[in-house]
Structure formats: C-alpha cells, structure tokens
Image: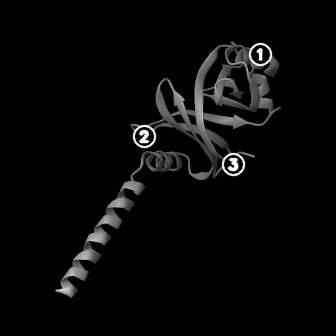
Amino acid sequence: MKKTLIALTVIASSSAYAEHHKKVELSDVDKCYMNAVEKYPGHVLSMESEIEKDRLIYEFDIMTKDGREVEVECDAKNHTLHDFEVEYKKGDKAFIEAAKISESEAEKIALKKYNGKIVDREYSIENGNPAYEFDIYVAKKGHEYEIEVDAVTGEILEVEMELYDIGSED
C-alpha cells in the first residue's frame, strides 16, 4: 500500500510539474520572443511591455547577426509581429539625409503631447520613413510614454505607455 501511495504521489507531482512548465513555455511573451528571434536572428538587447491603442505589446530590440540593430513589436494576444524598424545612432548620415525636421523640433512636438522629462531618444527608419522616438517620463501620471514623431512631417505617429523595460540597448 505504501509503495502504491508513493508511486501515485510521484506521478501526480510529476504531472503537476509538467503542467506548470507547459504553461510557462507557452506564455505570450515567450511566443512573441520566439517569433521575433526567428524572424530576426541575433541577440535580444532589451524588451519592453507597452500599451498601444488599448493592446498589450511586447517590443524587442535585437542586434542581428549582420550587425544591424532592429526594433520589432509583437501583439501579446495573437503573437503577430509588426512595426519593424532599423535603428540608427545619433548623427548617422543615412538618418540625417532622410530627416526633414530637426531633433529639437521633434522634441518640442513630443513634449507638447506629454509634458515631462525626456529619458531616452532613438532614431529609426521604418519602411523608408525616418522617425524620432522619445521616451518621456510624466511625473503627474507616474508613467513613461514613448512618442514617435515623423522626421519628415512632424506628425505624431504613435503614442505608447510603457509598463516596463528589461535590458539595455547601450
């Protein structure tokens, strides 16, 4: 009887362990991560969780095998990738030639939308279109917002509320 009870306990606990790990392996962030690195093989530098148009989005910054730094977003619900961008360093010739408004003009536009402190900025080209991206911490709201400004027209392209940021792009 003791041997049967021990065997049943081991089987039950093994099953519970396997079920728990199955849930972890199939989480939304894991599915998004796998889709991102499958599409853009390389090293994930950072990951952010954001709210964009009332949807949960995971954003991955990846250093690809060919040396490009890319940013890709993944919808947490259906695990689809979108908003692929190639990122550039400040002063990069390709970005400067494509941009029609200055960084300071874009900064003013972003701060007019969310008055706060700029804590990070990025320069990217998505589908041939250059954009400035500003992370602005708004103390009154207690959140950081990511504002993407078209570097040609000055139009605000995206506004996202950041939930968390893991890793560093530097």
Query: Label 3, on which residue?
Result: 67
Q: Earlier in the sequence, mark 1 or mark 2?
A: 2
In which quadrant of the rendered image does the N terminus lie? bottom left
Return the x and y of residue 108 as percentages of the image width and height: 77, 15
Task: Give the residue drawn at x 72%, y 13%.
Answer: 112
Q: Vertically, is 59 above or below 112?
A: below
Residue 100 appears in the figure: no
Q: How far, Cα to Cα, is label 2 from label 3?
A: 25 Å
The amino acid pointed to by label 3 is Gly
* Residue depicted at x 37% and y 55%: 23
Task: Pick whichever of labels 1 and 3 is earlier in the sequence.
Answer: 3
Residue 108 tag number: 1
Residue behind mark 2: 79
Q: Is residue 30 in sight in this rendering? A: yes
Residue at (49, 23) in percent of width and height: 53
Q: Nearer the viewer, mark 1 or mark 2?
A: 1
Residue 17 versus residue 119 in the image, above or below: below
Question: How far from the left and from the top, in percent, is residue 129?
Answer: 64, 23
